[in-house]
Amino acid sequence: MHKHYFQPEAETMPVNEIKKLQEYKLIHQVRYVYENVEYYRNLMDAKGVKPEDITCLADISKLPLLSKADLRDAYPYGMLATDIKNCVRIQSTSGTTGKRVVAFYTQNDVDMWEDCCARAIVAAGGSEDDVVQVAYGYGLFTGGAGLHGGSHKVGCLTLPMSSGNTERQIQFMMDLQSTILCCTPSYAAYIGESLKERGYKPGYNTLKVGIFGAEPWTEEMRHDIQNSLGIKAYDIYGLTETSGPGVAFECECQNGMHINEDHFYAEIIDPDTGEVLPEGSKGELVFTALDKEAFPLIRYRTRDITVLTREKCSCGRTFVRMHKPMGRSDDMMIIRGVNVFPSQIEAVLLNNGYAPNSQIIVDRVNNTDTLDINVEMLPEDFSDTPKVITKKEKQLQSAIKTMLGINPIVHLVAPKTIARSEGKAVRVIDKRKKLGINIKFSRQ
């Protein structure tokens, strides 16, 4: 087992020292934000809290929670905490559910973010000897920029491929002998599928590691990708609002992601009440950026449902670990009164030998929710008779019902008929929203 750290003093800091550092940074950051961000000052004033009320980490619960709605209200400059002349870059969210969130960065912010991504690369076994193929999107999306900068910090040869153009991805992967692939898990699965179609076996490439994030993926999908590419697949976590990927990362133990606690303070709250939950509880993850200068969010609600643990990790890192998100408090579907996460359906498909290329369609017919799941057949099954296909549909339907407690309708469709994604996969179509029905999202 490799025990490599990019910044060992920080990554192996004793927990009591981490807490002291976080407390020191929090007290200073709250004052900095109060003095420099009118929007946040108004929120604090409305809650009757002043910077001097924050004297220890526990006092963080006195502060207001921030949501994406706040960032949209403050768009574009309302959450900026420094003069624009001190900023060197912006990144932005996709804006799929409303106004884009624009995040600003000073040079110090960029350096900190790239350090966090470098930690992730080294934790996955990366070094200056590696060739890192960055197939996350470049541009406003944080994936490409973050891993690109982290790769440079480690000293790797960096291939700034961006997403898409799979033909070229494979050519460069083979010709330049890439050893680390960075992209979304759905695109990694697509590259693996494309390699297989071209007659390549996993041993034909020189890849050893993948660092995948930006969308939810299950353990079953991890094994699927590892087998198709012949690699060890690592998770990375982050969000544009707090900098980008690298807020948390997996080590070689692959047992939860270490949060870079010297830069980010994590809490778990009850998503319905906002109450801070004790360690080990499942709830919504909330982050405070402890030393961001340009866009310093305090108590930002990620909407990701997870659990934090301080159990000792054999990699030697002392940072708290977050479990792989179990879904989101705002993308969980309630179908016929049952809480459903798309990742649950994906797990059933992979456990039953299907690829994760599926589409979930939720609708409402005669005041009753319907759940249809289109699943691609494997090429070798496409020649099955209609009778055999119907039998397989019923078997899969039964397996999903066992997992969810509700009966779906499963449609096995021809290979390649569900649109592939080179970025984030669109897996769910909820037609109830188009009907103007108020769909409640809550925690599992």
Image (cartoon, grey):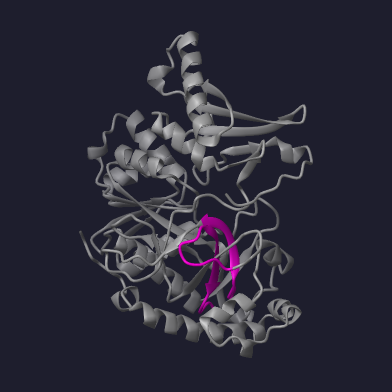
Q: Is residue 336 visible?
A: yes
| Magenta highlight on residue 303 | yes
Q: Position of residue 366 (x, y in %)?
A: 77, 27
Residue lying at 54% horizontally and 79% vertically, measured from the top left? 58
Residue lying at 23% horizontally and 38% vertically, measured from the top left? 204
Q: Residue furthest left?
A: 1
Residue lying at 53% horizontally and 77% vertically, measured from the top left? 292
* Residue 247, above or below 262: above
Q: Nearer the viewer, residue 347 or 238?
A: 347
Q: Position of residue 64 (x, y in %)?
A: 66, 74
In which quarter of the view is residue 29 placed?
bottom right
Residue lying at 51% horizontally and 19% vertically, measured from the top left? 394
In the visual, does 409 lie left or right of 348? right
Quarter placement of the N terminus: bottom left
Residue segment shown in magenta: 276-305
Q: Position of residue 167 (x, y in %)?
A: 40, 38
* Residue 334, above or below 51: above
| Magenta highlight on residue 92 | no
In the visual, does 182 lie left or right of 57? left
Count the numbered circles shown.
Answer: 0
In the visual, does 393 lie left or right of 127? right
